[in-house]
Amino acid sequence: MTENAAENWSALHIEQTLGGSPEEGALGPAALALTMGFARLGGQWLAGKVDAFLILRCGAVIAAIGALIASQAGGPAMAYAGFIVMGIGASVLAPTAFSLVGQLSDPKVRARAVARATLFGYFGYFLGPPLLGLIAGAFGLRMAFVFAAVMVGAIFLFAPLLARQRT
């Protein structure tokens, strides 16, 4: 949810909230996407060496910090830094979550469980941008990114519930 919302609203945040040019605004989604691409490769390497729940929780905290940095940015450069940090954290969330669903599912229903998790992932992917838009319309884009930080930060709180399923 946070990833797609940031891709959709980062340019507007840079242009409208921070007074950046359209060219500067275009760099917001680019910074997020480029960072996520490279960070996903690093996350794949890390997945073989570190507990998946730790990756999930750390990724959530890093993404939330990035969203908060972007929300409080005073100019485009600080917003880029926030989106880069957000991209680093968010890059590991979906792959790690899907991997955990596969690992924790009974082999007889594994495919169905991963498909269901993917469905919920797409639900968030499509719900996130309009939800942030509603919040931005009512409270501004800064608060929309604070909301994104809270949503992704919730993963940190709920990951232990999923971890209990492993035992």
Image (cartoon, grey):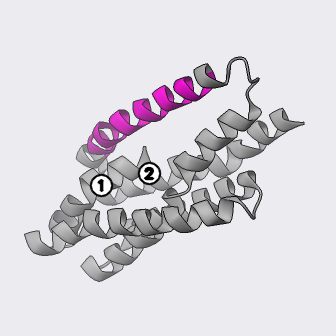
Instruction: Name the quadrant containing residue 70.
Output: bottom left
86, above or below 112, in the image: below
Can see residue 20?
Answer: no
Q: Amino acid at mark 1?
A: Glu
Left or right side of 56 for 88:
left
Q: Is 152 above or below relative to 107?
A: below
| Residue at 67% from the left image edge and 59% from the top image edge | 47
Q: Amino acid at mark 2?
A: Ala
Instruction: Say whether residue 115 is magenta.
Output: yes
| Label whose residue precedes the other's in the sequence (2 or 1) | 1
Give the farthest residue toward the left.
22
Which of label 2 and label 1 is nearer to you? 1
Quadrant location of the C terminus?
top right
The x and y percentages for residue 35 are 40, 69
Residue in front for this viewpoint, 150 or 137: 150
Tell me: 78 left or right of 50.
left
Residue 127 in view, yes or no? yes
To which quarter of the image does residue 123 belong? top left
Task: Name the residue carrying label 2.
Answer: 148
Residue wearing tag 1: 7
The magenta region covers 113-135
Describe the element under mark 1 as helix, strand or loop: helix
